[in-house]
Image (spheres, rainbow, N blue to C red):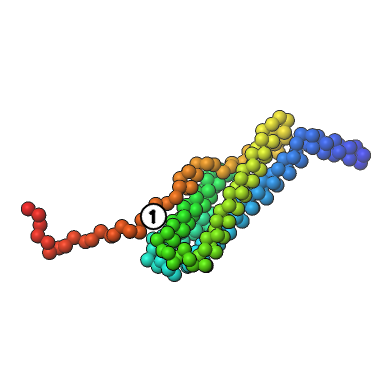
Amino acid sequence: MRYLTAGLLATLCLALSGCGYNTIQTQDEAVKAGWSNVVNAYQRRADLVPNLVATVKGIAAQEQAVFIGVTEARARATSIQLTPEMLNDPEALKKFQAAQGELAGALKSLIAVSENYPELKSNQNFLALQAQLEGTENRIAVERNRYIEAVQTYNGTIRRFPVNLTAMMFGYETKPNFTVENEAEIARPPTVDFNTAPAQPADSTAEPAT
């Protein structure tokens, strides 16, 4: 009986291996690892925000709307925690992506402030933070692309016969991926005009027009 059970287990293992079960496991872990790298890259960007805001505020304190926008966007981005276990929820991924895109846009507005303040362009702390931000944005792009490729590989595997039968048997489904929706809008440089004079209140003593 013992030998029969061992034989059945061995046969089952070979069958699962031949039907792609082990491949699914390997690629699923690759997706999870890729997502962790994406989150780490986004977190690194969020960690730069307080120092960037403080540095710019020290020279351009009057740009309160920009500072508030960046701070609020950072708070929204960091409040959405998307674990690998939640990656099968397309709505959760969409909200995460939208919040990160909002922070990216707000940071572009913050960096654009430097064009109006020569002191910022020569501030070594600001220049160092700007370089770190650029490096982080590049890292985000790299990790996102790697994650996209990992998900594409995984989804392709579990859709192909006969692995799709194994996937259905064990409840594995395709995973949602990053979309290019609004990517063009996110990448567009912000329009920042600090030269527009505020509207003057009407003079209450002026004679009404006749």
Residue 57 in the image: state x and y as whole percent.
43, 67
Q: Which quadrant of the figure contains the N terminus?
A: top right
Specify the farthest residue to the bottom: 58
Which one is nearer the viewer's eye here, 30 or 9? Answer: 30
Q: Tell me if residue 168 can be seen.
A: no
Q: Residues within 10 Å of mark 1 (few under 14, many from 20)?
A: some
Q: Secondary structure at mark 1?
A: loop
> Residue 193 at what x, y percent from top left?
36, 56
Judged from this view, the residue extending furthest toward the left is 210
The x and y percentages for residue 74 are 49, 58
The residue located at (42%, 64%) in the rendering is: 118
Relative horizontal placement of residue 108, taking residue 89 as reference (left or right) = left
At 73% across and 44% down in the image, what residue appears?
26
Disc 1 residue type? Val
Q: Is residue 62 left or right of residue 87?
A: left
- The answer to whether residue 176 is visible is yes
User: Looking at the image, which is closer to me, 63 or 47?
Assistant: 63
Q: Which residue is mark 1?
A: 192
Q: Image check: 204 left or right of 20?
A: left
As drawn, 18 above or below 98: above
Q: Is residue 32 left or right of residue 89?
A: right
Q: Name above or below for residue 59 compared with residue 28.
A: below
Count the numbered circles shown. 1
- Residue at 92% in and 39% down: 3
Looking at the picture, tell me which residue is in the foreground, 99 or 140.
Answer: 140
Which percent across, then down, holds residue 77?
51, 55
Which residue corresponds to the image point at 64% horizontal and 39% vertical from the top-left?
Answer: 152
